[in-house]
Image (cartoon, grey):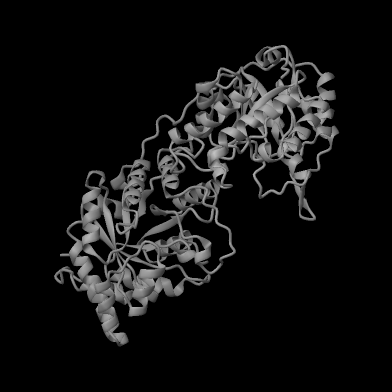
Amino acid sequence: METPPRLFKDFLEESLVVFDGGLGTELYGRGVFINKSFDELNLVNPQLVTEVHRSYVEAGADVIETNTFAANRVKLRQHGLVEQVEAINEQGARLARAAAGASAYVAGAIGPLGIRIEPWGPTSLEEAREAFVEQARALAAGGVDLFVLETFSDLPEIRCAIEAVRSVSALPIVAQMTLEEDGSSLEGVAPEDFAAKLEAYGADVIGVNCSVGPHAMLDAVEKMATATARKLSAQPNAGTPRNIDGRNIYLCSPEYMATYARRFIQAGARVVGGCCGTTPEHIAAIRRAVKSVAAAERPRVRRAKVVDKPVDVTPVPTAEKSTFARKVTDGRFAVLVEVLPPRGCDPSKVVESVRYLHEKGIDAVNIPDGPRASARMTPQALAHILQTGVGIETIIHYTCRDRNLLGMQSDLLGAYAIGIRNLIIITGDPPKMGDYPDATAVFDVDAVGLTNMVSRLNRGLDMGGNAIGPPTGFFIGVGVNPGATDLEREIRRFEWKIEAGAEYAVTQPVFDIDVLDRFLDRVAGHRIPIIAGIWPLASYRNAEFMNNEVPGVVVPQPILERMKKADTKPAARAEGIAIAREMLEGVKARVGGAQISAPFGRYETAIEVIEGIVDQASGGKLKLA
C-alpha cells in the first residue's frame, strides 16, 4: 500500500494539519442504525467505510481517522464482538490506509472505554490499560501513522490510554479532551489545567474535540495555548445537534466552520478538523481556509504547575465531623432509626414522629434516598428540616442512580453548606423496581466511585482535582451485605470502599447472626465500625416480601416459620419485635451500633425493639446494656 513520503511527525513540524470530520455521523447519515456497532462495519461492510474515508481524503483532509473509536473490548462486548477486537482494529487501519494512499496520513482512533475506572468505578487502572494496549497493538499492526485519543473526559483514563499506546508504539499521539459549554472538561477541569497534565503524560499534540460547537471551543484553545508548548488541535462538532423528525441535525455551515478553523489557528492551533456532524463539505471549506492563513505566533507559555491536591488543607478529624461520628469512633454503641421522607411536600407527620424518637433518646435518624426507586422528598431537604426543627442529628442516604457526577458534587456541596455531615453512600435501586419503571437511571458511578468523590471533597478537591477552598467534613458511610450470594465479590467491594475513604458501614437487615459473624470474621483485617441493620417484621407476608423482593436480604426458613405461626396481627407484630430483639442482643457485642427500621412508619415499633434490652436506669434515655 502507498504511504505518505514523510513521517507524520515531520509533516506536523512543517505544516498546518487538517483532520477529517465526523466518521460516525457520516455512517449514520448513510443508513447505519445507531444501535449497531459502527466498528463492526470494518468487517461486514468495508466498502461503505472505505467510501466515507475517501470522501474526506478527496475533500482535502491530511489525516483520516480509523473507524475504531469504540473498538475496545468493553464496548464491543455489548454487541457480542469481544473476540473480534484485534480483527476490527487491524482491518479498520487497513481500510483507512488503502483509502488514504500517499495523499493522507492514518490516525488510529481510540475512544474512552465507556465505563468508569478507578477512582470513579470498579475497573482498575491496570485493566483499563490492558484494554487500550490490545486496541493500540492491533491498530499499529494495521499500519497507522499516528494515534488519536479523543473525546475523553476523565484524566486518569486518558493517561492510561497514553501509557498503553506508548508501551506498544513510538508513533505520535494526539490526545483530546471533550468540553462542556462552559469551556471546562466534563469533570470540571479547566483547559489550561488539563493541557498541562496531558503534556506531563507524554502527548505529542494536545487538543479538544466533540461535545460543543466551534464558538465554545475557541476559548479553550486560547487558554491551552498559554499552558503548554505542545502542538494544539481543535475538532469541534458542527454545532449543537437539533432533533428534526427524529434525526439529529447539525446546523453549522461549512463556511462557519471554516471561519473558526482560521480562528483556531490564529489562537495557536496547528491541527484543525471536525467531529460529529462535520461532513466532507465542511472539511473542504476548512481546507480552503487553512490555505489562506499562516500559523500564528504562539503566546508565551505560562508553565502551569501540575498538581493533584491543594496545599495547606487540613482535613476535618473524623471524631470532629459530627456527634454521631464521635460516638462511633469512641467505640460507644449508636442507635439509629430509619425515617422515610414523605411522598409529598408536607413533612409535618414525619417531624412529629422524629420528635418522638428524639425524646426517646435515639442518636440519629437515617433518611433513605428514593427508597425502592420511589419519588419522595429529598433526604437533604428533610434532614435540614429535622435538624433545625427538632434538633436531632441526621444521616442521609445518597444514591448514584439519579444524578451525574457533576450533579452529585453540587448536591453534596450544598448539603454540607446547610449543615448535613453524615452520609451513607449507596449505588441505588434501578428505576424498574419502583413506581416509575420508565424513568432513566444515570449511574455515572457506583458507590465506590462516589465514595472516592466525597473523600476528595473531604480533602478540599473537586472531582477534577481542583481546589474548593475549605474541605468538607462528611462522615462517610457505605452499605454492605453480609448475606450476599457472591460473598467474595461483596468483600472485595467492601475493601474497595474502605480504600476509597469509607469510615463506617451499615448492613442490610440481619436475620441470621451466624451470617453476620462469618462476615465480620472475614473482614477482621479491614474493619471500620459496622452498624447492623435490624428490621422488625410486621407479618408473614412482610417476611416473604423481604426474602423474595428486597435485593440482598435473606430471611432464614426458621424465621419464616415463626412468622407464619403468628396468625393474628398482634401476634405477628409481637413475634417480629421478639425476633428483632434477638438479633440486636446477638450482634450488639460485635458491632458499633444498630439501625432499626420502622415498617410502615410505625416508629413505636422501633422503640419497643430497643426498650426490650436497654438499661432502664438510664433516666429515660436509650442506652444499650
Task: Using the image as rendered, state which of residue 144 and residue 502 is in the foreground.
Answer: 144
Give the residue displayed 39% in from the left and 76% down from the top: 600
Q: Quadrant of residue 176?
A: top right
Q: How many marks?
A: 0
Q: Quadrant of the N terminus?
A: top right
- The outermost residue toward the bottom is 568
- Point out residue 402 in the picture as x, y percentages from the top left corner: 53, 56
Q: Is residue 475 above or below residue 585?
A: above
Give the residue displayed 42% in from the left and 72% down from the top: 350
- Point out residue 543 in the picture as x, y percentages from the top left corner: 34, 74
- Point out residue 195 in the picture as x, y percentages from the top left corner: 58, 26
Q: Is residue 156 above or below residue 242?
A: above
Q: Is residue 372 visible?
A: yes
Task: Using the image as rendered, state which of residue 269 and residue 312 is in the foreground.
Answer: 269
Residue 449 vs residue 264: left or right? Answer: left
Q: Is residue 189 visible?
A: no
- Point out residue 498 in the picture as x, y percentages from the top left corner: 33, 44
Q: Quadrant of the C terminus?
A: bottom left
Q: Is residue 236 above or below residue 585?
A: above
Task: Using the image as rendered, state which of residue 297 and residue 353 is in the foreground.
Answer: 297
Task: Using the image as rendered, state which of residue 259 and residue 166 is in the foreground.
Answer: 166
Residue 363 vs residue 289: left or right? Answer: left
Residue 138 vs residue 282: left or right? Answer: left
Q: Quadrant of residue 507?
A: bottom left
Residue 505 vs residue 521: left or right? Answer: right
Q: Is residue 605 above or below residue 521?
A: below
